[in-house]
Image (cartoon, helix red, strand yellow):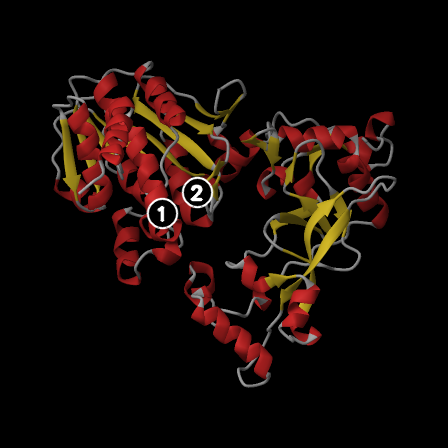
Amino acid sequence: MVPPVVLDMFETMVAVDPTASLAYLYSRVVAAEYRRFLGTFFTPREYAESMVEHYANQYDDPKVVVDVGAGVGSFSELAARYWKTAEVFSVDVNPFTLGLQAVAMSQRCRLKTRLVLGDYRDWLKQNCKAGPTLYLGNPPYTRWQLIAKQNRQQLVADALGLVGPLANLSTLFFGMSLVKLTQDDGLVMILPSNWMHARYARELRAWLRKQVNRKIVLRRADSWRFDDAMVDAVSVEVGPQCRGLQQMAISSWKMDRCFAVQRQDGEKAIRFAESGDSPDTSSRSEVLLEQYARIVRGTATGANRFFIRAPEQWRDFEIDEAYRTPLARRLRAIEGREESVPDIAELLCLEMYKQGENKNVDLLIAMGERDGVDRGYLCSSRPKWYDLSNEFRRPDVIISTFARERFHVMVNVDKLAISNNLFGLYWKEGICESLKESILCWLRSCDGQDALRRCSSEEGCGLLRLSPRRVGLIRINRAVCCGTAGSSSKECS
């Protein structure tokens, strides 16, 4: 029997905002590692409403709305509210979240909403549309490695050439939906932004550039922090076909910054738009940082608590120094010193290790397997789950990922490894030492720090977060690279 106080609390919760409350309840009850296989990451309410409202303010009402990977129905609820005469289909393979949506629906009258328990791709093949359709929502974020191997080939085939292998499920569903669009159909989806640059979506990007009679807007969302993941997301809005040429653009979420995508620039069009640059309009006085350096994330171990420990902890396990390598855990400032200093830990280094070589290492591996470390999605994808040797990052320069005031930039003299909470900068071949020093001085300067802050996203509570791709698109005045920059490039304290 459910205690009355618990029942009262539940009824109060679903009475106030049933959809949001049940989404929160699901995310608290179901552990993140189990949600990951189904790609269940709920869209913050303010983002979902902004997407629906922006589309509704521009285009005629759809007759049909398809909520792709509907979950507990945030987008379905908004669709029923904004387009009262539309028939809304909530499609999801997860019976638990769809059941929660049914509970939420019982609190509000939604006569036009149909719950569809099944695979979205099967529904696409079987359903006959009854008029202008809007494909809407937040498709599942399941990574390629977590998609069942027997399903991968068919998923790629269903995208009809727009998406290749290695794509996450949300991009595959995105491609399947695009090929279904008729001239009166539209699409609004929020996805991880990887597809904007990944090879597996090259044909998808080309398809979008060719839709010259459809208005296309890519709105960059702030990074979303979940219990165990961080997602750089982008909302994709594809309008119905219109007369005349339509604009394709990339914007900030609030659309206070907007850059046109010049479709004729081909594969580089999105990158040029993101940097505010193009072959025809770029300033000759500025260059992109990526022309001189490659920016990468540090090693994603999949289990930092197992692989990264303080030296004294490794000594407690009696792990020989031959099986450890120094690692920068984070960067911090020291009063009176210009350059940042690292907090040092050590990373387990088992390159070419064969079990039986060292009894203490064998015991450590067995402990990891007992605790299920080997079953994590990153560890399980390696030939030997404990061998990170092909993933080590020992960059020329280390850059902090997060900051409130300034981002740390440190020359990696000791060739420390880095984990994925830091970024690494590798100089391209042929870059002279004086040019390297000029660029680093500029990155630490007020102008450089301003540039880093402008390309960052807000994480909340004043915390800023960088991404490697956007750091590479930072524009540097050529005077800096020629060593003729003025006082504006002095160290910023």
Q: What percent of the width, then of the height, locates residue 44?
A: 39, 30
Label 2, residues with CA under 10 Å away: few <14, some 14-19, many ≥20? many
Label 1, residues with CA under 10 Å away: few <14, some 14-19, many ≥20? many
Q: Quadrant of residue 305?
A: bottom right
Which of the two residues, 276 or 348, is positioned nearer the viewer here? Answer: 348
Q: What percent of the width, then of the height, locates residue 129?
A: 14, 31
Q: Is residue 185 visible?
A: no
Q: Quadrant of residue 319?
A: bottom right
**Tag 1 secondary structure:** loop
Q: Quadrant of residue 416?
A: bottom right
Decide: marks 1, 2 in contact (CB < 8 A)?
Answer: yes
- Mark 2 residue type: Trp
Q: Quadrant of the N terminus?
A: top left
Q: Quadrant of the C terminus?
A: top right
The disc placed on residue 314 is none
How many labels, in total? 2
Residue that badge 2 annotates: 195
Residue that badge 1 annotates: 163
Disc nearer the start of the sequence (1/2): 1
Q: Is residue 67 left or right of residue 295?
A: left
Residue 340 vertical placement versus 234 (above, below) = below
Q: Choose mark 1 or mark 2, whichever is in front.
A: 2
Which of the two residues, 420 or 15, is positioned nearer the viewer here? Answer: 15
Q: CA distance from mark 1 to mark 2?
A: 9 Å
> Residue drawn 83% across and 44% down?
437
> Residue drawn 34% across and 18% down?
53
- Mark 1 residue type: Val
